[in-house]
Amino acid sequence: MAVYTHVDPDDLATLVARYDIGTVVSCKGIAEGVENSNFLLETTGGRFILTLYERRVSEADLPFFVDLLDHLAKHDSPVPAMIRDRNGAAIQQISGRAACVIQFLPGISLTHPTPGQCEAAGAALGAMHRAVADFGGARENSMGHRHWRAVAGGAGNLDTVLPGLQAIVDDELAFLDANWPRDLPAHVIHADLFPDNVLMLGERVTGLIDFYFAASDFRAYDLVITHASWAFSTDGTHCDPSRARALMRGYAGEVTLTGAEIAALPVLARGAALRFLLTRSHDWIHTPADALVTRKDPSPFLARLERYRAADAAGLFAAA
């Protein structure tokens, strides 16, 4: 989440008047993340999130996201509802951007999850995968394997981010092109289930949020993205065995991976680490200096990539 586009107070009041959520009390920008403009909207009817869609989120994709969240909510997944106005519309326009008013969920996002919280996150991911298995929608994964060369090319000179990074990325792209798996179980995945996209109270998951990278891809790829973001130290240099095992144990309680999926986990994890290394490098170079946004350091995902490239990487995915 971030703020790139500012909202005129009169335009905001006009937007809120379309809903049965009261009148505006306050609207404050949220600085975390890098994708959309987000605001904590307080009205006389409660708290909501106002999201204006920027850059990587196409307006044409918004009905897919609305349908996905509706589907998951009907399957009791803890996802935020897209609030409809009096005419039943979830997608609006404000400040020249497509926008949605979204349910505010209780809970906090974590910085240093415990093993118990990792297990709960793994279970929530597995339950979400079971819930979405019969979802009829589909979306091309614009951040998936076949797009990584284009992302790398569009980032610019990667050596300006970290010395020697360009050669590392070129080598990894060649490896993944030669070794990326085929025909693994696939459906729509979250594709970005970092701790800041999971709300928790204690060891209970209260919200899975920010589905704007959701797309059709391997379910095991979604699992390794979650592994990379929950099981490592902040700098990416250390994979905590207790947190990793707990995450995998939680997921296994909901979904049984196939033998082919288990064998593919180290390669998929290398892809996950590269994907975030590339997009964070791109944003490090291209984020406007005056944006209310927290840029994310790419180097922790270079460290994760190096760990996943190690000969013993398969052991990182044990559930016991």
Image (tube, grey):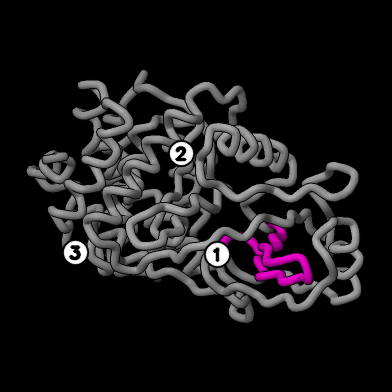
Q: Secondary structure at mark 1?
A: loop
In the rendered image, the residue lying farthest to the top is: 183
Q: Give the amino acid type for the residue marked by disc 2 in the picture.
A: Gly
Q: Secondary structure at mark 2?
A: loop
Q: Which residue is mark 2?
A: 144
Residue, x 69% and y 60% (percent of image)? 51
Residue, x 27% and y 44% (percent of image)? 270
Range shown magenta = 35-53
Q: Residues within 10 Å of mark 3 (few under 14, many from 20)?
A: some
Residue 237 in sight from this viewpoint: yes
Q: Secondary structure at mark 3?
A: loop
Side (left or right) of 135 relative to 256:
right
Residue 237 disc label: 3
Side (left or right) of 84 relative to 77:
right
**Looking at the picture, does residue 213 appear above or below residue 40?**
above
Give how far across and how far down residue 24 sits, in percent.
81, 73
Query: Does residue 39 belong to the magenta stretch?
Result: yes
